[in-house]
Amino acid sequence: MDKKLKIPRLPHYFFKLYCKPEMYEELHGDLEEFFHERAVDKSIRKARLLYTWDVIRCFQPYAWKAPKGLNNSSITMYNNYFKTTLRTMKKSPLTSFINVFGLAVAIGICMVVYSFMDNDFSIDHHHLNKDEVYLTTFSVDREGETEQYGKSPAPMAEMMLADFPAIKNMSRVHDAGAVVKFQDKVFNESIRFTDPAFLDMMTFPLKWGQKSSLNDMNSVILSEEMAIKYFGYDNPIGKSLQIKFSENNSKTFQVSGVAEAFPDARIIEFGFLMNFENLQIAQPDMALNNWKTLLDGLLLHVEEPSDMQFISQKMDKYIALQNTVEKDWPITSFDFVTIHDLHLKSRHIVDDISYDASWEGRVTLPIVALFMILLACFNYINIGVVSASGRLKEIGLRKVIGANRKKVISQFMSENLLITFIAGIIGLFLAISIFLPWFRDISEMPLKLQLLDSDLWLFLGAVLVLTGVISGLYPAFYISKFSVVNIFKGSVKFGKKNPVTKVFLGIQLVLACIGITGAVMYAQNTAYQAERSWGYDEKNSIYAQFSNPEAFGQLKDLMEKNPDVVSTAGTVHHLGKSLEKTVLHSPDHQYEVFEMKVGPDYLQTMGIDLKSGRTFRKNQTSDFKSIVVNEQFVQNIGLANPLGTVFKIDSVRHEIIGVAKDFHFKNFYYENRPTIITLADESDFQFIAMKVRAGSNEKVYEDLESNWSALFPETPFQGGYQDEIWVGFQQDLINMRKFMTAIAVILTILASLGLYGLVKLNISGRIREFSIRKVLGAGLKNLASDVYKQYISLSLIAIVVGAPVSYLLIRANIQMMFPDQKSPDYSGVIISVAILVVVLVSVIASQIGKVLKSNPVNGLKTE
Amino acid sequence: MIKVIYFRIYFTDKSKFNIFPYITDKSKFNYMSRTNLGEFEEIVLLTVGVLYDDAYAVAITKEIIDQSGRSVNVSAVHKSLYRLEKKGMLSSRLGDAESKRGGKRKRLFNITPFGKNALDESMNLRMSLRQQIPDLALKF
């Protein structure tokens, strides 16, 4: 044949690809005939083209080959597998319940964890410019330790905007408290001052009003929540709000915009947003051109991330400027963090506009989910292996008919995937209806599972496939291994003595042990933290906060008339409310410490005891150069003889006159830090603290409130009981205990279900043996010891391994949150092991009881 | 995963995909009982008859092109032939190998009695309908 008359290769290949092999000859023969004819009649080129066209036209169902693996027989086979699975599940409802329920619970918990992680990783990701907007931070090096701060010097913003043309936009952010008044609604609120570009850089769409109104000095933009709080559901645009920044300093603003409801996964937000220039009105003392003044945040918007790299290399000028002004806080670098990363990095950034309250959760929850999945998988594996005996004949028959090992494995895998799939549906249902609402209550996070979210289904699919493969692989290999001859000869020793089963059961017991230990130790920790001394008398103290310097004297005079008030004191910083950082200089060192500025009576009033030395004296001006330190301070700095030691603060000499016993300024999430107490002038006071006679808290509180409203009818009262100052913390403790208990209960139920299934299968396999023993006169002791013997060494090993592991793991976990925890204490582990043993014994006992009660005749006449 | 499964369902002949048995339930999807012919199918069936012993796809295609002047692609003829065979109106056998076909055999078709019935039925229906048209209706 002529060489040129060759059929075009590519279309020919394509034809072969799709064409049924049995039809290839006749169909392609037709095409070839046309091709050759056309090559003669027309031209080779045309023939080739037309041939290609024919190939494309023939790409139709009549010519297609069936996809591999989907021919009739394999479909029938899978149908049969499906049927067999359903029958097996029906035949032994208990094991199928254990399998499906266990997997469903585990998958449900996984979904909750997914929801938590999804929420956490999408925090503040709704901003369109999240990758181009940066928060400016600076790092301070103190004796080798770097600390990153989220604030920035006030004059820097405008300088940077002028210096770097790459910066498209910038917005300073600063928050301040104020009293907001609309008709009879008066509340203390936090106001956020920003540059007008803020709303362009961040994505906060407005429901009503214009973004540009932020340019106007007399406008305020509200969040939806605040709009509803003050104005109800109507459009409030144009209404006036009176905002009182401090006593005798108030201004009227027009509502010019209301933001749409913020997404749930957000941290950066605002209640009241106004032009940054108003900050100068709100706080006239704030020197905005001084490098010492720090703003709460500086956001920069650049075109490309590479611009920011360029900028961060050119920051030396700013570092130098800052360090000449603020010598106590030498900055080592300015760094820029995108809004996208801010939440996850916040844990290492002090005082930034975001925060990260959930990293412990991010560490703990996936582990919990993994434990659940493992437990459920092990249950499945163990039960699958042990119950293989019931299916040997089926497998033997399949093999005889011609199934090879691969087919049997694929049967068991598909069976397993089906069960996992059912479990997945139930699990999703459990997650949405039970676990998630419960977890939402405990975590107080707005968690959701959005069924329309494709990632959710992707995750669920991945979990199902993974679970299916983990749990199904071993049983499938194990069961398919038996040779046909041995199966029918009856000589296969199946399941009973499989070492792998034992290992898995052991791991399950260890996991359950960890779970129970978690619950017990968390409960102990909660009790410990609740009873811990705060270092002062929190039970009989009341406080109130004010912004008006005269308020202190007026309140003090009125309250001292109340016979139940033991003493009153004014202070700038109040325990649990506020604190400062300062730097102490000694000749060869400098120390960064917390500072509390208080009035002379404050220590006695709050019940902070002195270890040595004296406290401040009234009307003694020299005490303004004295300091009282806490024990931690003495310990950290290593002073042998603290009294009389001199430090410089801002180059003024201060002498230690007393050492106070340790008190907890913050809740127990924070470790005790070196703190100094200095004397403050009465005109700076911001709080009044009162010690009251025991049991009269409520009466004094009411008196304080009524005095307040008589004195300052325009300002809402801000005060409370000192022992309620950590309500959130105390609630956290309770919630954590609840969470851990629930997890422990679920883990234990799963593990004991697995054990129950194993014991039951084991005993039912030996029912004839037990019956014969009973006939021969065996009693409880004999039978029980026989059954327990199987599990005793395994349980012992599990406990020996599990107890220390769980102790260390849970202690480390608690340590993440509570730096000062109970001194090493093994009682928690001992209690947990005891609980575990009781559960184990009772699970096995329930089965022995059944054997005891059963009539041996029934056992012997089976078959 | 989901996309792959979808793909398979879509591209597989329905009769082979019986995970859900009702899809191939014969009473619902019985192609065999359909005796009515499509217009093109009828032409193909007739042409098979015309060509008698030499009715294979290429010849049929050419014959239809010659006789009707339509442009017909061989794939359309293939489709009709195999469908008619499935309906039982055609029977087929493999013919001889020919060099002009690259040494490949051709499939030769014959009309079955059932095919003849179908043709007659269709013809009769047309004729009887044609004869029922009143002369007036065709006076222009």
Image (spheres, coloured by chain):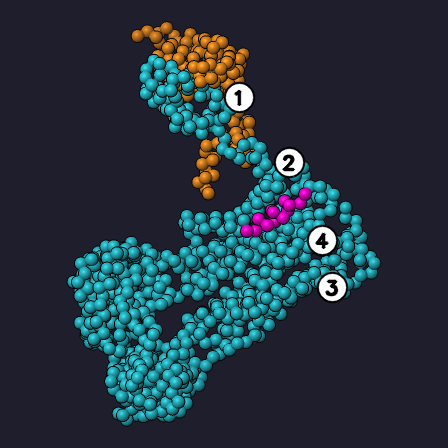
Chain colours: A cyan, B orange
Vertical arrangement, residue A89 with respect to residue A812, above or below: above
Quadrant for residue A150, please give it: bottom left
Q: Is residue A477 magenta?
A: yes
Q: Secondary structure at mark 1?
A: loop
Q: Chain of mark 1?
A: B
Residue at (33% x, 56% y) in the render: A125
Q: Which residue is found at the position 63% from the left and 55% from the top?
A: A500
| Residues at marks 4 and 2 on the same chain | yes
The x and y percentages for residue A69 are 53, 35
Res. A826 in view: yes
Labels 2 and 1 in the same subunit: no
Whether marks 1 and 3 lie on the same chain = no
Q: Are marks 2 and 3 on the same chain?
A: yes
Q: Residue at x 32, y 17 (%)?
A: A43
**For discs 4 and 1, the disc positioned in front in the rendered view:** 4
- The magenta span reads A470-483
Residue at the spot of label 2: A402
Q: Main secondary structure of the magenta part?
A: helix
Q: Which residue is mark 4?
A: A764
Work out how far the residue at label 2 is from the one at label 1, CA to CA, in angstroms: 35 Å
Q: CA distance from mark 4 to mark 2?
A: 32 Å
Q: Reading the chain from its start, which is encountered first: label 4 or label 3?
A: 4
What whole-number distance in Å separates the C-alpha atoms at marks 2 and 3? 45 Å
- Assign a secondary structure to mark 2: loop
User: Mark 1 — residue?
Assistant: B32
